[in-house]
Image (cartoon, rainbow, N blue to C red):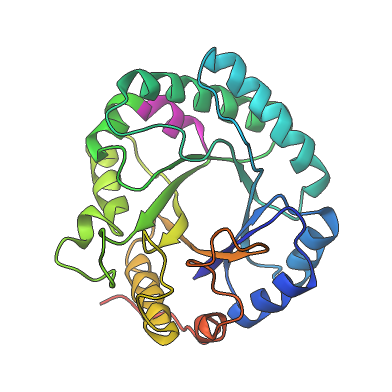
Amino acid sequence: MGVGVYGLHAGDSELSWLLRAQPTIILLQDPDLNFARDVRQYFPKAFIIGRIFLAEQPLDNPEQRGIALADAVAEKAIPRKGLIDAWQGYNEPVGHNDYAGYRAWNILQTAFAKRLQGQYGIPAVVGNDAPGVVEPEDYVKYFSDAIRAGAYFGIHAYAAPKATSFNTPDAQYYVLRYRLIHNALEAAGIKDVKMVLTEVGFGEGWLGHVTEQQMASQFVWLADELEKDPYAVGMAVYGIFTGNDWHQFDIDYTTIPDLLGQYQPRKPN
């Protein structure tokens, strides 16, 4: 069970909500150094992922872009070594069936992961594509190099469109899609990929669709599902925000963090 914190200047307010949620997975976007230190101090055993916000995500000259991206991430990551465990690069850069984009994205991610890990000793989280954009079998066909290169594979997991529950008859194609991807990778001989759900939620947000208690219960259901899969590192709820741009997804100033903080994993059957 985890949560993502988004904002250029996270501080005491965000830390208080994290303390209520008691996450074991934490994603931090653009964390300042002091905040990263505080988070690690209070959550010494958490798996913490770093992300930098990028206004543009070009895919031209992909190998050079990947190397430059690793250098840019390393500039933030090196001072935060020991505080943040792994870093992702681009976020949701390709569309559905954009095969030319897939090829470029694969080259870029592979170069990013090899540079970040080989040159700087910083684990990379590849993937992090928009939910449902890439078909499970296309990860094998187009992204094998990147997935093999990265220390972790990030997935964005959202409920079916218009759904107000994760637990729907077609959940395997939506919030549990990571299992289809895992099965496709294993069948192709790409073994032991560590998967982490770097974004989790409803596609249009929870606010105005379900109550705080109902949303928290959905996150608990998904966390219990993840407990069944040893290759799944965990999930980061989307999220805690410093601004109002994503208010329909925002869980701070609600009881949701408190309810998540009460979570106790169920032993898989």
With respect to residue 112, does 12 lie above or below?
below
Q: What secondary structure do most residues of the magenta stretch adopt?
A: helix
Name the residue at 30% across, 62% down.
Answer: 159
Name the residue at 63% across, 37% down.
Answer: 54
Name the residue at 56% across, 82% down.
Answer: 254
With respect to residue 150, does 221 lie above or below?
below
Quadrant for residue 5, please give it.
bottom right
Residue toward you, 7 or 115: 7
Residue toward you, 18 or 144: 18
Residue 177: image x %, image y %?
A: 28, 52
With respect to residue 139, does 48 lie above or below?
below
Q: Give the left or right position of residue 159, taking residue 116 as reference.
A: left
Residue 56: image x %, image y %?
A: 59, 30
Q: Which residues are magenta?
A: 143-150
| Number of numbered callouts drawn | 0
Residue 148, magenta (yes or no): yes
Residue 30: image x %, image y %?
A: 71, 49
Q: Give the left or right position of residue 40, taking residue 162 as reference.
A: right
Residue 77: image x %, image y %?
A: 74, 42
